[in-house]
Amino acid sequence: MSSGGSRFGHGFDRWIDECKMAISGAVLATSKAEFWSGFLISFVIFGTLMNLLASGFGVFSTMAALGISGSLKIISDAFLAIFGFDKSFGDWALTFVVVVLQSILIGLIVFVWHAKCRQQESTVTETAKNAGNLQDAGIATGLAILGTGCPTCGTSLLAPVIGSLVGTGSYALAGVVSWGLTIAAVVLILFSIKRVGRDAYAMITSERFLNKRKEQNVSKNTNFKK
């Protein structure tokens, strides 16, 4: 019994250490331009898209009917909604958290990918790993849009399916499932950040160590020549 508890304790401690490493990697990555390029692009596009779909897929029909000027106004309003304009605090806070987490994940993936290219170690294994990270990010995006960014989409898409299985009350159940999808998206994003954040931490610390060794070698060579 004590052996099982000890294994659990070691496993939990290791998980905490990995989380700390991932957080450190994410913080260190914020000093890199590659991270911010991925973060900002994701923040603008993903955040605008989630707010556009907040009222359902019908927004695209409305945009087509209003023309270019009307469409630009709708898109600009959706962008401003990222920062809480014309939104209740509850709706804004949930969407903003998902958008920020998703953007951090994309920023970390972009940084790690660029770092691998710089080190010329982009092997087949690493390429497949990065592709898997992007796939997880895409799945999380889809879940977030269905659950948070487009509640009416979630209801319209889920209610008929749930209704065929459980009958009445399908719309209320679809709303619950929508929240479940949002939670699933956040959990998937956090686990993905944990994984990619550790890679970022390892790469940044390794890069710093190699640079420090190069500086020491240069200093030794300089002193030797003197």
Image: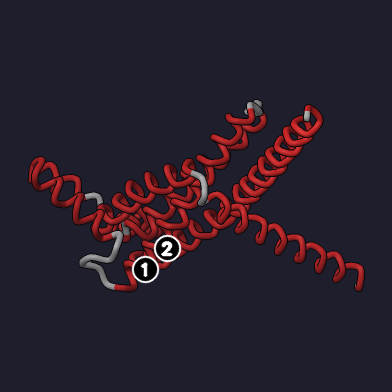
Q: Residue at x 62, y 57 (%)?
A: 24
Residue 167 located left or right of residue 10: left
Question: Can residue 167 be seen from the camera position used here?
Answer: no
Identify which residue, 32 or 15, lies in the foreground. 32
Residue 115 located left or right of residue 46: right
Which quadrant is the N terminus positioned in?
bottom right
Q: Please tell me how crowded label 1 is: few (under 14), some (14-19), or many (20+) other residues with Cα within 10 Å.
A: some
Q: Residue 178 in the image: x percent, y percent? A: 40, 62
Q: Residue 95 in the image: x percent, y percent? A: 37, 62
Q: Check disc 1 and report the residue beneath it.
A: 93
Which quadrant is the C terminus positioned in?
top right
Q: Which numbered tag is attached to residue 216?
A: none
- The reply to whether the C-beta atoms of the residues labelled 1 and 2 are less than 8 Å apart is yes
Residue 125 located left or right of residue 45: right
**How far is mark 1 from mark 2, CA to CA?**
6 Å
- Dot 2 falls on a residue whose secondary structure is helix
Identify which residue, 128 or 177, lies in the foreground. 128
Q: Residue 133 in the image: x percent, y percent? A: 56, 42
Q: Please tell me how crowded label 2 is: few (under 14), some (14-19), or many (20+) other residues with Cα within 10 Å.
A: few
Q: Which numbered tag is attached to residue 97?
A: 2
Identify which residue, 225 or 175, lies in the foreground. 225
- Dot 1 falls on a residue whose secondary structure is helix
Q: Tag 1: residue type? A: Ala
